[in-house]
Image: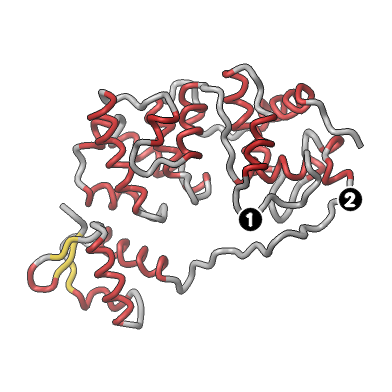
Amino acid sequence: MALPDPAALHEAVLDWYAVHARALPWRDPSCSPWGVFVSEVMAQQTPVARVEGPWREWMQRWPTPAALAVASPGDVVRAWGRLGYPRRALRLREAAIAIVKRHGGQVPRSEAELRALPGVGAYTAAAVAAFAYAVRTVVVDTNVRRVLARAIEGRAQASPSLTVAETRLAAAHVPEDPATSAVWNVAVMELGALVCQARSPRCGECPISDRCAWLGAGRPAYEGPPRRGQGYEGTDRKVRGDLLQLLRDAPKPLSRSDFDVVDPDPQRVDRLLDALVAEGFVEPLSRGRYRLPA
């Protein structure tokens, strides 16, 4: 079974995306670069389906970097809600402050300037440059890696972590035209998210199934290093999230005993509460009370 040449691969995936792309608000042509930036930070380690509601509320409240830059840390953590990894909320606020100070309130265009912002790594910088400004770059997430591993290399899964070879493979398949490259980057992501899924790929709906190396080889099983899923229930991360949620929902500061409902181990609660205070997520008050930062 022959692999598609780049032009045929681009055409098949882009045609599929034109019909099947989810209508997400940050993909709308009217969305500002700031809106794209916020969506990418929110979607880090979080399913896109959980992002749209908080994104809309966030953009209504803080439609520009300047608006977020003057918000309090407590308001930002509270508005983050259950998106998880609340440190991203504080980093987003710090990035907004940096955008105002360094770039006149405008999200920068270059990947180098984007990477210099708090909380922005290589993936986020590339995604914002591509999706906000149609810069020709390489946007590589888990979905992109999986699609290319299967379609081009015939492997069931990508490597457990991003490799140089995977980055080169993705770069080799980005269209030369900047505008087309931006659509391609998001189209391959969407194909991986909706069709070429990790556990239950829907090969019958794939636009390149007739040319997929993995499908043509009979869908061989994954033979690489073990891929361990990340648990959540019972973890420190879960308890931290519950502690913060209790503070978000409280109309007034809470006493230490109010947190006992979160976890039966008081030493664990004390340890995680102290960590949240040290990291700036929680503000201690007199008489052993706590609140989100003012």
- Dot 1 lies on which element? loop
| Three-letter residue code for mark 1 | Pro
Given the image, on which type of amino acid does mark 2 rest?
Answer: Gly
Which of the two marks, 2 or 1, is nearer to us in this view?
A: 1
Q: Residue furthest front?
A: 164
Residue 62, numbered label = none
209 over 197 or under it: above or below: above
Q: Earlier in the sequence, mark 2 or mark 1?
A: 1
Q: Is residue 244 above or below residue 186?
A: below
- In the rendered image, which quarter is residue 15 located in? top right
**Label 2 Cα crowd, 10 Å radius (few <14 / some 14-19 / many 20+):** few
In the rendered image, residue 22, in percent from the top left (x then y), is placed at: 59, 35
Q: Residue at x 42, y 67 (%)?
A: 238
Picture quarter with the N terminus = top right
Taking depth in this image into account, of 126 and 30 the one nearest to the observer is 126
- Quick check: 160 above or below 147? below
The image shows residue 182 at horizontal and vertical percentages of: 57, 25
Q: Secondary structure under badge 2? A: loop
Displayed quadrant of residue 21:
top right
Distance of mark 2 from mark 1, alpha carbons? 22 Å
Pick whichever, 218 or 191, lies toward us.
Answer: 218
Residue placed farthest to the left in the image? 286
The furthest residue to the right: 1
The residue where tag 1 is placed is 160
**Circle 2 sits on which residue?**
218
Mark 2 vs 1: CB contact within 8 A = no
Q: Position of residue 88 (x, y in %)?
A: 36, 49
Residue under the image location 66 percent in, 42 percent down: 166
